[in-house]
Amino acid sequence: MITYKQIISPSEDLKSTILKLLNVTQGDGLFEMNYVERKLANDYVAGAFKNDQLIGVGIARSMGPNDFEYYLPFGLEIRLWFQKYQMGSFDTLAIEDAYRGQGIGQEISRMRLKWLKEKGCNRVIGVSWVSGLAHTSNRVFEKMGFKAFKKVDHFYRETSLKHPFDCPGCKVHPCSCAAILYVYENL
Ligand SMILES: CC(C)(COP(=O)(O)OP(=O)(O)OC[C@H]1O[C@@H](n2cnc3c(N)ncnc32)[C@H](O)[C@@H]1OP(=O)(O)O)[C@@H](O)C(=O)NCCC(=O)NCCS
């Protein structure tokens, strides 16, 4: 049976497993332990477990009015959303390879939306990585009721130049993958 819970004060082992899952699925070197620790301390981290083994993790964040910069490649008007709405973010989601396409990402995302709503967010955005892999997050976003706002080619190029990682999607450096911004209005 698969169980779901918010991860609060995990053991060092579980923290390492979260980090490994994020890096294996999205690119070796992309995430560091201080990212995981920051998310655990300030944001929302949900996990899916099979017999106590972590098989999925999803992160959500309630954002402040000045947290718009990362999203500006999708359009300068996004800055205004941060003035008008309490913005929430679907930060990242990763499911162990063998368990993909079984609804686990959607279940974790329902938990993320619920938490964001409790935090007072009324608009949620998330960046979907166009990886070319068999399982991509666009389907999860769409199933959850998000709408595609805009696709940006080479979205991760600058990040991968500043902080090199091995992209399992395009497999080149700098990363040449595109990204789509998804929006959930009226939470
Ligand atoms: C993207 C990811 C997080 C989605 O999680 P998931 O648990 O696989 O997603 P779910 O099963 O909840 O939902 C995906 C839906 O799309 C469907 N789907 C997924 N891949 C599909 C494919 N290649 N073809 C057709 N349908 C597909 C699933 O069947 C499911 O639909 P259903 O509910 O009707 O069965 C996961 O696959 C993953 O970790 N991928 C690699 C890392 C990644 O891309 N992370 C996101 C970064 S933005």
Image (cartoon, rainbow, N blue to C red):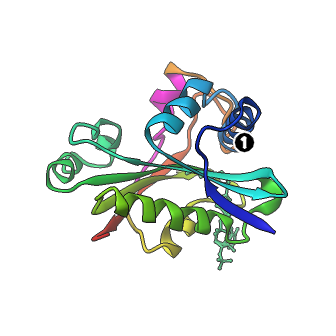
Does residue 151 belong to the magenta stretch? yes
Between 97 and 136, the one nearer to me in the picture: 97
The reply, left or right, for residue 111 in relation to residue 52 is left
Task: Establish if 33 lies above or below 109.
Answer: above
Numbered marks: total: 1
Give the quadrant of the C terminus.
Answer: bottom left
What's the residue at 29%, 61% (across, down)? 123
Distance from mark 1 CB to nearest ligand 1 atom below 8 Å: no
User: Quadrant location of residue 49?
Assistant: bottom right
Magenta highlight range: 149-161
Instruction: Give x and y (percent) for residue 35.
Output: 54, 30
Give the quadrant of the N terminus.
Answer: bottom right
Instruction: Give x and y (percent) for residue 48.
Output: 70, 57
Does residue 184 belong to the magenta stretch? no
- Amino acid on which the number 1 mark rests in the picture: Leu
Furthest residue in direction top, as rendered? 162
Between 174 and 111, the one nearer to me in the picture: 111
Element class at badge 1: helix
Residue tagged 1: 21
Instruction: Give x and y (percent) for residue 132.
Output: 65, 54
Q: Is residue 92 visible?
A: yes
Ligand 1 rendered quadrant = bottom right
What's the residue at 79%, 54% (across, down)? 97
User: Quadrant location of residue 50?
Assistant: bottom right
Estimate how packed mark 1 is, as few (under 14), some (14 to 19) or many (20 or more) residues with alpha carbons within 10 Å.
Answer: many
Between 66 and 7, the one nearer to me in the picture: 7
Task: Establish if 1 lies above or below 6.
Answer: below
Q: Is residue 150 visible?
A: no
User: Quadrant location of residue 15?
Assistant: top right
